[in-house]
Image: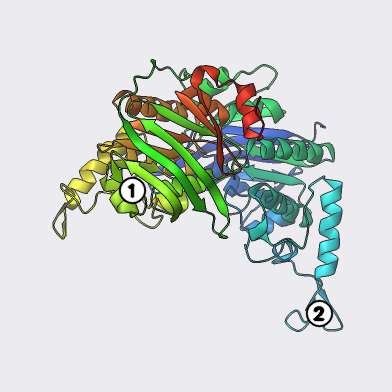
């Protein structure tokens, strides 16, 4: 890493109606550096990156690339300046191949009509050859001919990185790149990042995961409520000190809870079989129970049937065979609404698809599962005042960072979207809480809050089924740990026996 700054932000300010998203932010990125960007949900990280990438135009301040002041009116200007961005939600066309996705917008044309794009032929072979070269150069291991829809999330992310490198980016912005990755895929990504910087690429790495920052960053910058509050060196920082910089107060990173006092069985699952979207068996003869007043955590590498299990339990996916019983009632083939009315709260893995209606206001999203019931409705008549009062209460209680309850859910940061889902699902009388990846994309202060809420639900007598790809989260919260591998429950362990080593072996399909 040299001392040459490749990217600078000087006094960048961005305002939206009712919100000062960035307040005179200064930022410097050095050549060959991994700069980690930390901050709470709504701290302004993504807004700042969107200005650097030309998606937003700053109200004040300037951007310099290699010492030259530039005006970023669009992503095309950023790409021309050598800046690439990999968004948290990938910008890929699932039915197209890797090659076709990467050449979109910069198509290579061949033939004697090559100067007439609409008449020339796309030169896929040339692009595929270049993708192969980049893949080998940066150890990105990808097949140019594979369809995006057939690739794991980790490989899709590699396609996004190659797409930026193909456009000659030497500055990469990675927005929450590990939010949808398994621990193994995250480790592979970190190796790729180190390889990229060793060859002169500079990286801004946005994340909420403090362990990752300390493991991979050369330098750490912290935003809080739109202001740059400081930088730190991984050699001198700790998870505790970084959490305090982010939130502005001490954060308890360990879950504090009393011993569980399990009661009656609330959820009984027997010999459950659920298929995936291709018709293949994803959940194979799974049986377990969850009692009132306990947390059963399901650990496993993502993609081993956890999503299909949760969707089968909540009515979002048909069950092929087996049974689901909730408080003595058969819930095997009932609708999601009926599941909710049986006293079940569900925090889904995909908040965008199953948790929110992005175009609806926050207020409406907060009553999606109760809008037709009193006090929010009287028969067919909606009580808008009751909905607004409930929304104001929940926004304050769950610290949803928004200028208004009428703001659309789609305009919120990822972490604040998650808070809306958590607030809605935790706010009514529930007997069973099914939560899948409850803290994905959420900052440390909010993780502390959500974990405390889960423990509070348990202590109030709620049965909790927790599914998480974060092993630390499962081990911290669960009273018993079930490990899934290849669609099966390998073993269910009491918390005292669920060591990282043993659970790790079970996650890999081994036992001893």
Picture coordinates of residue 312, whole percent (x, y)? 44, 49
Q: Is residue 207 visible?
A: yes
In this picture, is 110 found above or below 92? below
> Residue placed farthest to the left in the image?
378
Say which of 341 and 249 sits in front.
341
Q: Is residue 364 left or right of residue 112?
A: left
Say which of 450 and 393 sits in front.
450
Say which of 377 and 486 sits in front.
486
Asked whether disc 2 touches disc 1, contact meaning CB atoms under 8 Å apart, the reply is: no
Say which residue label 1 marks.
331
Mark nearer the N terminus (2 vs 1) = 2
Q: Is residue 402 visible?
A: no
Element type at marker 2? loop
Mark 2 or mark 1: which is in front?
1
Q: Is residue 96 left or right of residue 127?
A: left
Quadrant in which the C terminus appears: top right
Residue placed at 86% from the left, 61% from the top? 129
In this picture, is 492 found above or below 152? above
What number of labels is visible? 2
Picture coordinates of residue 500, whole percent (x, y)? 61, 23
Q: Is residue 119 left or right of residue 433?
A: right
Mark 1 crowd level (few <14, some 14–19, many ≥20, 10 Å Cα): many
Picture coordinates of residue 116, whole percent (x, y)? 77, 82
Mark 2 crowd level (few <14, some 14–19, many ≥20, 10 Å Cα): few
In this picture, is 91 found above or below 222? below
Residue placed at 41% from the left, 41% from the top? 269
Indicate which disc residue 451 carries. none
Picture coordinates of residue 239, whole percent (x, y)? 58, 20
Residue placed at 67% from the left, 49% from the top? 157
Say which residue label 2 marks.
115
Name the image colouring. rainbow
Q: Quadrant of residue 431?
A: top left
């Amino acid at each position: 890493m040299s001392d040459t700054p490749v990217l600078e932000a000087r006094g960048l300010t961005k305002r939206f109606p009712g919100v000062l998203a960035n307040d005179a932010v200064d930022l410097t990125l050095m050549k060959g550096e991994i700069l980690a960007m930390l901050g709470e949900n709504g701290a302004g990280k993504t807004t700042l990156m969107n200005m650097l990438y030309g998606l937003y135009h700053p109200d004040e301040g300037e951007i310099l690339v290699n010492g030259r002041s530039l005006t970023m009116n669009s992503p095309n200007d950023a790409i021309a300046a050598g800046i690439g961005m990999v968004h948290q939600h990938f910008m890929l066309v699932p039915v197209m191949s890797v090659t076709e996705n990467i050449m979109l917008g910069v198509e290579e044309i061949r033939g004697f009509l090559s100067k007439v794009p609409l008449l020339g032929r796309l030169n896929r072979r040339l692009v595929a050859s270049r993708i192969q070269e980049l893949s080998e150069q940066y150890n990105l291991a990808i097949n140019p001919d594979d369809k995006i829809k057939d690739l794991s999330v980790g490989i899709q992310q590699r396609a996004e990185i190659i797409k930026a490198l193909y456009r000659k980016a030497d500055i990469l912005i990675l927005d929450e790149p590990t939010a949808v990755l398994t621990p193994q895929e995250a480790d592979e990504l970190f190796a790729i990042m180190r390889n990229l910087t060793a060859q002169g690429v500079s990286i801004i790495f946005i994340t909420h995961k403090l362990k990752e920052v300390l493991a991979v960053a050369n330098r750490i910058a912290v935003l809080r409520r739109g202001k740059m509050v400081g930088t730190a060196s991984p050699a001198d920082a700790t998870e505790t000190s970084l959490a305090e910089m982010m939130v502005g107060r001490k954060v308890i990173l360990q879950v504090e809870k009393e011993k569980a006092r399990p009661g009656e069985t609330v959820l009984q699952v027997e010999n459950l079989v659920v298929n995936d979207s291709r018709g293949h068996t994803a959940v194979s003869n799974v049986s377990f129970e969850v009692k009132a007043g306990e947390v059963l955590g399901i650990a496993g590498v993502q993609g081993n049937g956890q999503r299909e299990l949760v969707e089968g339990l909540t009515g979002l996916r048909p069950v092929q065979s087996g049974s689901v019983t909730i408080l003595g009632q058969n819930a095997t083939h009932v609708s999601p609404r009926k599941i909710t009315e049986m006293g079940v709260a569900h925090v889904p893995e995909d908040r965008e698809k199953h948790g929110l209606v992005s175009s609806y206001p926050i207020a409406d999203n907060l009553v999606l599962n109760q809008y037709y019931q009193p006090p929010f409705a009287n028969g067919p008549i909606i009580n808008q005042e009751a909905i607004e009062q409930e929304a104001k209460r929940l926004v304050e209680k769950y610290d949803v960072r928004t200028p208004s309850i009428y703001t659309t859910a789609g305009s919120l940061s990822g972490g604040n979207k998650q808070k809306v889902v958590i607030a809605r699902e935790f706010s009514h009388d529930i007997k069973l809480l099914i939560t899948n990846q409850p803290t994905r994309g959420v900052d440390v202060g909010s993780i502390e809050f959500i974990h405390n809420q889960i423990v509070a639900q348990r202590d109030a007598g709620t049965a909790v089924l927790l599914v998480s790809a974060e092993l630390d989260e499962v081990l911290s919260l669960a009273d018993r740990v079930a490990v899934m591998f290849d669609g099966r429950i390998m073993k269910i362990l009491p918390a005292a026996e669920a060591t990282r080593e043993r659970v790790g072996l079970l996650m890999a399909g081994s036992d001893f």
